[in-house]
Structure formats: structure tokens, C-alpha cells
Image: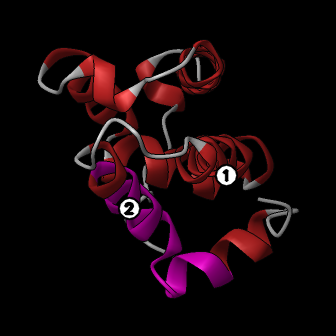
Amino acid sequence: KDGIRDEYCYKVALHRHVPALLFTSLDSYTCRSLDMNDNEKSMIFETIERLLTNGGRLASSHIICNIGILSWLRGILVSRNLQTALQSVDMCCKFLSLLNTALVTVLDWGDQNDLPKDHARY
């Protein structure tokens, strides 16, 4: 989670498919049994949030437009077993913090004209 300091670091991580791997890893962890330790899921939530806050416009546009973090977060709430995905109060707080960061990032873009037009290009 401490490896992303700026947009350049995000580009390096993006070329290694790190953001997509994080999202799929969390999906895998939520399918595991209820007695699993929350450390891995907690670290993934924190890392994704760090990507959004430190990765610059490229990171925010890629994570929001290409990966679809808002739909992914909605999927955790709607279609999955919440007891498995968010087992503790700490996990719920980390989830809400990530949701807040994603929404603030979208709101910071302003109107539709301010959305990055080249989010698909790295």
C-alpha cells in the first residue's frame, strides 16, 4: 500500500496489472470461509484507497472508468454475502472509507466535461 506515491508509480503498477489483481483478489477472499482473518482484505481495501488518492488523474480515471470501482463496491453490498465480505466493524469502516474516497474523487471531477477523455490510454 505504500508503493504508490504518484502517477508514475501507478503507471508502473498498471503495466503489471496490479489494480485488476487487487480487485479480483478481494473477490476471491470474500468467497472464503467465515473464520478467515481480515488482514488480507483490510490491506486490499487500504491499497485500493491509496491508489485512488496517490495515483493522480490516471489512477482515478482508470479505477473509476475502466475497472468500475463504484459498480464493484455496489456488488459487494448487493449480490454477495455481507457477512463474509465485511466480517467486522473494522472491515465495514475500511469499506466505507474506500467508498467515500471513490465518491469524492468522482465529485472532484466536476461535471461530465471535466472527465478525462483519454482514460483508456496509459
Looking at the image, tell me whether mark 2 or mark 1 is earlier in sequence order: 2
Q: Residues within 10 Å of mark 1 (few under 14, many from 20)?
A: some
> How many numbered marks appear?
2
Q: Main secondary structure of the magenta part?
A: helix
Secondary structure found at label 2: helix
Separation of residues labelled 2 and 1 (CA atoms): 12 Å
Relative depth, front residue between 73 and 15: 73
Residue ID at (67%, 52%): 47
Quadrant in the picture for residue 88: top right
Residue ID at (57%, 51%): 44
Secondary structure found at label 1: helix
- Does 32 appear in magenta? no
Quadrant in the picture for residue 80: top left
Relative depth, front residue between 21 and 89: 89
Range drawn in magenta: 12-27
**Is residue 71 visible to us here?**
yes
Residue ID at (17%, 16%): 78
Residue lying furthest front: 35
Spot occupied by residue 51 in the image (x, y as percentages of width and height): 67, 52
Amino acid type for the residue under numbered disc 1: Thr
Amino acid type for the residue under numbered disc 2: Ser
Read off the residue under disc 1: 47
**Is residue 107 visible to us here?**
no
Spot occupied by residue 35 in the image (x, y as percentages of width and height): 40, 39
Residue ID at (43%, 40%): 64
Tell me the number on the disc at residue 64.
none
Q: Residues within 10 Å of mark 2 (few under 14, many from 20)?
A: some
Q: Is residue 94 left or right of residue 64?
A: right
Spot occupied by residue 117 in the image (x, y as percentages of width and height): 43, 50
Read off the residue under disc 2: 25
